[in-house]
Image: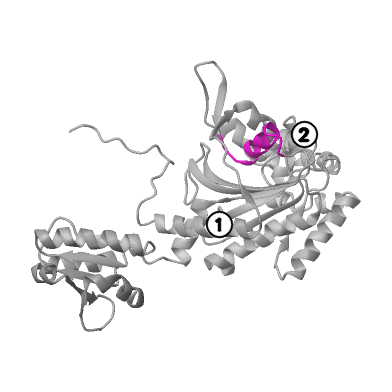
């Protein structure tokens, strides 16, 4: 036998029993984006490597360890996108969408990072991203949080997630704080774990949100970012909290929340669950006012978030299971003439009742076998055709989920009758 070829580790198939969760989530997300007046943008999954080096930061884990990077036939260095914000900003600059304009955009699609696969976290994963440009005030930051809170309610997950927020201040205030933090950490450098020692020279703020309990104990007495904010950022954060309070959004201010990407400033936030193990963040974002200029565009204020689709689907599977129903109506037909008649009727139903899910029985089988298939499909009604029904142009209606007597209808009345039965 030929050797079986399996999927690449961390790049998973989405199987038929899982796709209903994806369909439900994607449909709710699209309605949600429409309800807030956001427009969809679609970007390529391959970009120039330099885009992510400049946007995400050359010394971040993503760029140093996790990107899928290769040279094309022209010798150009290309990468599969590890996140969507940089691509969205690049597209906005390239197509003249950002300068002196307000944009509210969203996108959904696959991202790629070569990291250790774990529950809900894969090497090919999918994200919804939402980005706003040209709005400097805290009200749009609040709207992004309100939007995500509305999603959890729509999915029935509101009781299983919590919100953490923080302010990183302006880029200038953060740079001054960085120096204070490094001065505090240098004397205890040898007590830090390997990751934190490396970050001390590259991105020391990331040490604050280390998941290592020993590191957390060491930074407990470190200077607080919240005590080193500039006045404008303090006012921005106060306005954000006021809007969240007015809308009944519960949150925790986590002064160690810094986010993993270099481009954030001022508002940062994360939605976290304890239902998926240690890696509990399912949605995160914040403000990144300097990124557009960093990528060669005019200075443009911006904020946004991204959420992992696989992680939310895993949460839905655990907390809000969906019953798989393949059909509303199952066509049961015995004999060749009945089989042909059944296909004709199924097509007529699809023409006149396009929302109705109709499944034909193929491959023959006696009535017992066909009714077993009908039951397995989840259909509520079986439409039954035999030789007599074909001759008389009638059809039997058998209720599969209710204790009702079987009906016999004229085929010409079937569409109208089904409207009241389904």
Residue 128 in sight from this viewpoint: yes
Q: Which residues are magenta?
A: 81-97
Query: How many numbered circles are shown?
Result: 2
- Where disc 2 sits, the SS reads helix
Tell me which residue sits at (53%, 65%) in the image: 155
Q: Is residue 208 left or right of residue 40?
A: right
| Earlier residue among tags 2 and 1 | 1
Q: Residue at the far front: name it.
A: 412
Tag 2 residue:
293
Task: Classify residue 249 by image quadrant.
Answer: bottom right
In front: label 2 or label 1 = 1
Residue at the spot x=65%, y=35% of the render? 91
In the picture, the quarter occupied by the C terminus is bottom left
Mark 2 crowd level (few <14, some 14–19, many ≥20, 10 Å Cα) = some
Which residue is label 1 attached to? 29
| 122 vs 333, nearest the viewer | 333
Q: Which mark is residue 254?
A: none
Magenta stretch: includes residue 370 = no
């Amino acid at each position: 036998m030929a050797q079986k070829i399996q999927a690449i580790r961390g790049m998973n198939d989405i199987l038929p029993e899982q796709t209903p969760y994806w369909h439900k989530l994607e449909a709710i997300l699209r309605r949600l984006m429409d309800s807030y007046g956001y427009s969809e943008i679609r970007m390529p999954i391959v970009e120039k490597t330099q885009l992510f080096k400049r946007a995400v930061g050359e010394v971040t884990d993503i760029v140093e360890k996790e990107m899928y990077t290769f040279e094309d036939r022209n010798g150009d260095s290309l990468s599969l996108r590890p996140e969507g914000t940089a691509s969205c900003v690049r597209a906005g600059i390239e197509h003249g969408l950002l300068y002196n304009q307000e944009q509210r955009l969203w996108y959904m699609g696959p991202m790629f990072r070569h990291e250790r696969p774990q529950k809900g976290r894969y090497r090919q994963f999918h994200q919804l991203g939402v980005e706003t440009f040209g709005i400097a005030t805290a009200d749009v930051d609040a709207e992004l949080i309100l939007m995500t809170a509305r999603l959890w309610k729509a999915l029935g997950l509101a009781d299983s997630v919590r919100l953490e927020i923080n302010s990183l201040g302006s880029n200038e205030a953060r740079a001054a704080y960085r120096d204070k933090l490094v001065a505090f950490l240098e004397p205890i450098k040898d007590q830090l774990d390997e990751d934190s020692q490396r970050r001390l020279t590259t991105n020391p703020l990331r040490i604050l949100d280390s998941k290592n309990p020993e590191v957390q104990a060491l930074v407990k007495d470190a200077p607080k970012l919240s005590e080193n904010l500039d006045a404008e950022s303090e006012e921005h954060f106060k306005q954000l909290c006021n809007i969240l309070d007015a809308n009944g959004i519960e949150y925790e201010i986590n002064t160690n929340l810094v986010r993993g990407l270099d481009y954030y400033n001022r508002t940062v936030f994360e939605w976290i669950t304890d239902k998926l193990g240690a890696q509990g963040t399912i949605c995160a974002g914040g403000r990144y006012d300097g990124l557009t200029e960093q990528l060669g565009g005019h200075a443009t204020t911006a904020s946004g978030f991204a959420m992992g689709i696989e992680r939310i689907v895993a949460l839905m599977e655990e907390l809000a299971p969906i019953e798989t129903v393949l059909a509303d109506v199952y066509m049961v037909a015995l004999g060749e003439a009945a089989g042909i008649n059944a296909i004709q009727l199924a097509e007529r139903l699809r023409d006149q009742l396009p929302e109705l899910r109709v499944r034909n029985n193929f491959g023959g089988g006696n009535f017992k076998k066909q009714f077993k298939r009908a039951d397995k499909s989840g259909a509520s009604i079986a439409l039954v055709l035999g030789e007599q029904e074909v001759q008389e142009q009638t059809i039997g209606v058998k209720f599969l989920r209710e204790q009702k007597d079987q009906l016999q209808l004229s085929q010409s009345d079937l569409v109208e009758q089904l409207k009241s039965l389904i």
